[in-house]
Image (spheres, grey):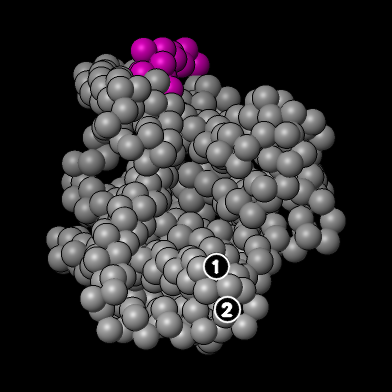
Amino acid sequence: MSQEIAMEWKPKHNPWIVCIPIMLAAFMFVLDETIANVALPYMAGSFSVSRQESTWVLTSYLIASGIVIPSVDFFCKLMGRKNFFIFSIILFTVSSFLCGIANSLPMMVITRILQGFGGGAVLPLSQSITLEMWPVEKRAQSMALFGMVVVIAPIIGPVLGGWITTNWSWPFIYFINIPIGIFCVYLSKKLIEDPPYARKQENVKMDTIGFYMLIGWLTCMQIVLDKGNDADWFGSTWVCWMTFFAVLFALIFFVVQAKKKDSLIDLSVFKDGNFFFGTLVQIVMHGVLLASLAILPQFLQGLMGYDAFLSGLAMMPRGMGAMLTIVFIGTVGAKINPKILTVAGLVVLSISGFMLCNLNLHIATVNIAIPNFLMGIGMAMCMIPIITLSTATLSQKQMTNASGVQNLLKNLGGAIGTSIVTTLISRKAQAHQSFLVDNMTMLNDNFIQRFQAFQAQFQATFDNITAGNLANNLLYKQMLQQANMGAFRDTFEFCAIACVVIIPLIFLIKGIEKKS
């Protein structure tokens, strides 16, 4: 594709002002992907269901938003992009209220599906509108603002959710969306405008087959990724069948998209090398981001004894690192080669992952804060330039479709990454446990010394047999903690290596040609 990008359309209003409702709406959507995580135990208690059943609150939201994301281009043609953006915010806001008043798990799942349908379009639309308002050479600044949403909102989510749930009640994590949503709708009507190619079109046809195949594919795949580890993956018959249908629906979906004229998404954007390789990098990065956000609170709460609010607070340095980097990129980032920034960011991400490999059960909070701070720096340093690079050679007309496709694949990367690390922790913990158990015998001098020391402590209160049992139980508990600790270290190492592996892809991406 030619590097020459047509820039016929320019917004009437100052792009920085137009960005206010766009960024607020995107922030709401991304925040709601993680804010509910810490409130799940409270929801489970309110609805009288198990913690495992309550995870459908998260799964239903991800499935619904995943279905809408690649359909964005179609609905923009059907309704006009501005109208669809405003409709999405209204649906998201109304369903947020319904989530807050839900009094049963089925009602909550239905309202979360509605919320996902409303919010799913917000992020790709926000990305495409933001990218179009600036010329290519100035997109680094706009992506710095967009990066603030993508990187910081998921980090703030658990902290804010923990604080609201602890001090108020879990429904308020949804009620806070209502005033923000109303404000976004008002400003969007006043400031946002449709360029000629994003206005309502006549005789728009729905790709019915593609849409149904998309629903089947994403639903089956999300269920497998969420529940597969609990069911021993392919050792379970239903997981095998769900995987089969997910692959079947996915194949039919992509064949239909490639051959049909009025397809749901336009796959021709993958012919653009920048978009193809840039999207691959973002899939892995999003997987690392969401995976680390999922397992680090588990480590802090499960092994270190932190509560939900403190574990979220311990991760706040990641947001501080991201914020500082975003300010830096927004001011001087345009003067630095974005490929160099991306590679440097991936290196910093990898370093932070390897630092987390040195965790133990006696660490101070600073040992969590420093690698988290570096992770925030690395994520912002590579996330913003790679979005700019991946869309640099696309025309404005392609932007809405490309943003939808890219965000769909990033969401899949996040879901797959989270599933992989959850399985790794489970399997690695079993492996470490098997190794450690072999050393817990009376043939091991270290074990004998620890056993006798604990037994002597308990003998002050209990008889010899009871003291021996208690000492043995205490050692077994410590062994489980060490096995889980080893599993977390191995998983953080996997994330660090994943960041290193994708660095060569950066060199396959063309740089941005600056206009004189």
Residue 126 x/y as whole percent: 54, 48
State the image quarter where residue 510 is shown. Answer: bottom left
Residue found 56% across the figure and 84% down from its top: 457
**Residue extending furthest right?**
168
Residue found 37% across the figure and 47% down from its top: 419
Q: Which mark is residue 458?
A: 2
Residue 239 x/y as whole percent: 33, 27
Which residue is tagged 1? 466
Give the crowd class for mark 2: few <14, some 14-19, many >=20 residues within 10 Å.
some
Residue found 51% across the figure and 84% down from its top: 456
Residue 106 counted in the magenta span:
no
Residue 499 x/y as whole percent: 27, 66
Q: Earlier in the sequence, mark 1 or mark 2?
A: 2
Tell me whether the residue at label 1 lies in contact with that at label 2, contact meaning CB atoms closer than 8 angstroms.
yes
Q: Is residue 63 left or right of residue 91?
A: left
Q: Secondary structure beneath disc 2?
A: helix
Residue 426 x/y as whole percent: 36, 53
Whether 149 is drawn above or below 175: the answer is: below
**Does residue 52 appear in the picture of this structure?**
yes
Whether 392 is drawn above or below 356: the answer is: above
Q: How many marks?
A: 2
How far is the residue under mark 1 from the one under mark 2?
Answer: 8 Å
Whether 179 is drawn above or below 478: the answer is: above
Which residue is more in the foreground, 442 or 141? 442
Whether 453 is drawn above or below 36: the answer is: below
Q: Which residues are magenta?
A: 202-215
Q: Is residue 153 left or right of residue 499?
A: right
Identify the amino acid type marked 1: Thr
Which residue is more in the foreground, 360 or 441? 441
Q: Secondary structure beneath disc 1?
A: helix
